[in-house]
Image: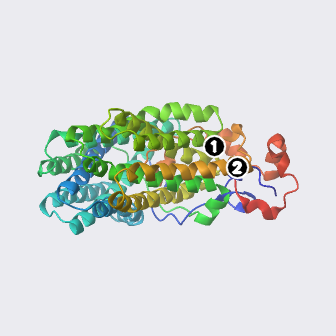
Amino acid sequence: MVATGDDALAFRPLAATDSDSSAAAPAVSSDVEIGASPRLASAGVRGMWALFLGLGLLMVGNGLNGAIIGVRSGTEGFSVVVTGVIMAGYFAGFLIAPTPVVRMIASVGHIRVFAGLASMASSAVLVHSVFVNPPVWVAMRFVFGFCFAGLYIVIESWLIELSTPINRGRTLAVYMIVSMTGLGLGQYLIAVADPSTFRLFVLSSVLVSLALVPITLAHTASAPEIRLPEPVSMRELWSVVPTGVTGSFSTGAATGVLLGLSAVYATAVGFSIERTALFLLAPTVGGVAMQWPVGKLSDRLRRRTVIFGVSVVAAGLCVLGIIVPSDHSSVLVIMFGIGGAMFPLYSLVVSYTLDWTAVEKTVGVSGTLVRINGTGALVGPLVTAPLMAWISPALFYWTVGVYFSVIIGFISYRILFREALPKERERPYVPFPARATSVAFKLVSVPKRVTKRVGKNVATRRHEHRSADDRFEGWSESKRSDGE
């Protein structure tokens, strides 16, 4: 068989014929599959909006908690390196949570798990205000991240149960808007009180606790069954879509730095609390604002080309962040632009990976993709914080720019030496939330035309798209693993 393009063929049950592919580590995490269960249509809309209200409260509390810790770490005299470890604790907990959470759900049910995790997360926030020392804060950030991964799993599985195949794409879009808007609003709330006191910790804890009210009291359908799907190995994912692997890790690292160390940078360069709040809010506003323009562009042009272009814009904005004085008003515009490129970029990478993935492999691939992205989010702050401490706070922009540059370099190579996927085989753009679990992939709409094409054999696809594949004539089957 011959490899036909960019991220070489699609995953199929017996993937021997699909080229460039392969999936990641056994997605122990959020690679959960939702089984069918009875649906109460009349409760669908009411239950869904209750879930979105609860999600919004959770995200406001989450954003506020992260912002307080970033600012308070500096005022308490913690080094930037220590603060980086504290912030990375959240992503470590997020990575580990899915498998044990799925087991808990199977044992005691969705509502009990949600109530338990929300209560634990709320308590972890309060512990920060009682015991102000790095080891405790690292542990509490780990607990907080663990709880939030589990809370996302519960909410996402219920959204799947309450949605229909027709409105799942819209449900995913609303999920993205609510989660990112809540996160940004929570970060902005850093300005409503003095971060050196316990008041903001209490407010964050209250917001997380209040999320229990709409979700536990909502009249929703019976909870769906959750089970682990067939895993897709990292090696397989890399062999099919190396761009997806590279892009997911790099965007995860950039996101980890932006969400974990923005407040640290703002404190280090002497921003006021009000300016810090705006500095933290700007990227999330940009991310929400630019999702649809970027998505529309990727549905019109080759998706790989759009990924390249967005990465170039993001890297260029990071260079501006280094050059422009930190007290200049344009810094907020730069952060808006970085967020407006970075968050849609992850959605582009998700959509691009799904273009090369057969429907039956979507959940397994998604678990691997989420774990890769989460690993990048964990590594990003751990690498960047020491550089900011030892060299300059400006390394905040430098490292984010480097992560985007990795994508630029890799995509440039693929564009030069690998044919792109035919445009008609690309799926619609997916506005995917940056910190969602792989359960949310069940909300991805899959057009029938794409499903049929992915199922065809390589020879047929080469015949249909011969103009794109001419230079691959004569490749031997041993070349399948060359990738996209």
Q: Is residue 444 visible?
A: no
Is the C-beta separation of discs 1 and 2 under 8 Å? yes
Name the residue rendered at 35%, 35% in the picture.
Answer: 332
Location of residue 68 with respect to 92 vertically, above or below = above
Q: Position of residue 377 (x, y in %)?
A: 42, 57
Calculate the distance from the C-alpha at mark 1 to the C-alpha at mark 2. Answer: 9 Å
For marks 1 and 2, the one nearer the N-term is 2
Name the residue rendered at 54%, 35% in the picture.
Answer: 295
- Closer to the camera, 322 or 212? 322
| Residue 22 lies in quadrant | bottom right
Element carrying mark 1: helix
Classify residue 469 as left or right of residue 195: right
Type of residue at label 1? Arg
The residue that mark 2 highlights is: 6
Quadrant into which the N terminus falls: bottom right
Element carrying mark 2: loop
- Closer to the camera, 175 or 243? 243
Q: Which mark is residue 342?
A: none
In the rendered image, the residue lying farthest to the bottom is 135
Q: Around disc 1, counting alpha carbons within 10 Å, would you say few (fewer than 14), some (14 to 19), or many (20 or more)?
A: many
Q: Position of residue 472 (x, y in %)?
A: 83, 51
- Closer to the camera, 9 or 248? 248
Q: Position of residue 360 (x, y in %)?
A: 61, 54
Location of residue 441 with respect to 174 vertically, above or below = below
Q: Is residue 95 visible?
A: yes
The residue that mark 1 highlights is: 304
Type of residue at label 2? Asp
Classify residue 69 as left or right of residue 397: left
Q: Position of residue 308 (x, y in %)?
A: 59, 43
Name the residue rendered at 70%, 37% in the picture.
Answer: 424
Classify residue 230 as left or right of residue 334: right
